Amino acid sequence: MSFSLERVVFILRKNNGYTLMDALVGLTILTTLSISILPLYTLLYEKRIITSQRVESLTILDGVWTDYVLLHLPPPTMIEKETEIYMVDLEHNRLCVKSQNGKGVCRSLPHGP
């Protein structure tokens, strides 16, 4: 079956764009991809928040540890940064900073003379 050039040109000129079926198939593919990526995005967002809290806890711990060990200042029991509250615990051999979600970081204290 062969088409003449005039017939091919006529068919291509008659094409007015996408059909409703083309649009629905494209929308279905886009929706499926969006739904499959959304859980990954929320997981990454939660991990970003946890990581930023951990970095802030480490920064606070470094400052409190330095003040306690080098300057012999008593550590505060609570530190408020922006919207987060961090609890500082002084145990017999380590200093810990915990965020509101219960996760924290600890650093051991040097032994006295």
Image (cartoon, grey):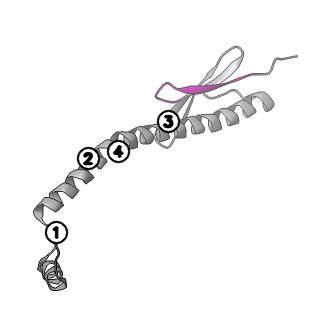
* Crowd rating for badge 2 (residues with CA inside 10 Å; few <14, some 14–19, many 20+): few
> Amino acid type of disc 4?
Ile
Residue hosting label 1: 18
- Relative to 34, 59 lies left or right: right
Q: Which residues are magenta?
A: 99-109
> Amino acid type of disc 1?
Tyr
Task: Answer with mark 3 or mark 1, whichever residue precedes in sequence.
Answer: 1
Looking at the rendered image, the quarter that the N terminus falls into is bottom left
Residue nearer the viewer, 100 or 43: 43
Residue hosting label 4: 37
Q: Are marks 3 and 4 in contact (CB under 8 Å)?
A: no
Point 72% across, 16% down: residue: 93
Which residue reaches farthest bottom?
6
Residue hosting label 3: 50
Task: Answer with mark 2 or mark 4, whichever residue precedes in sequence.
Answer: 2
Residue at disc 3, secondary structure: helix
Snapshot quadrant of residue 73: top right
Give x and y (percent) for residue 84. Answer: 48, 37
Q: Are marks 2 and 1 in contact (CB under 8 Å)?
A: no
Q: Between marks 2 and 3, how big is the CA–CA gap? A: 29 Å
- Label annotation for residue 32: 2
Residue nearer the viewer, 36 or 77: 36
Task: Answer with mark 3 or mark 4, whichever residue precedes in sequence.
Answer: 4
Task: Answer with mark 2 or mark 3, whichever residue precedes in sequence.
Answer: 2
Residue at disc 4, secondary structure: helix
Point 20% across, 51% down: residue: 28
Task: Answer with mark 2 or mark 1, whichever residue precedes in sequence.
Answer: 1
Residue at disc 2, secondary structure: helix
> Amino acid type of disc 3?
Ile
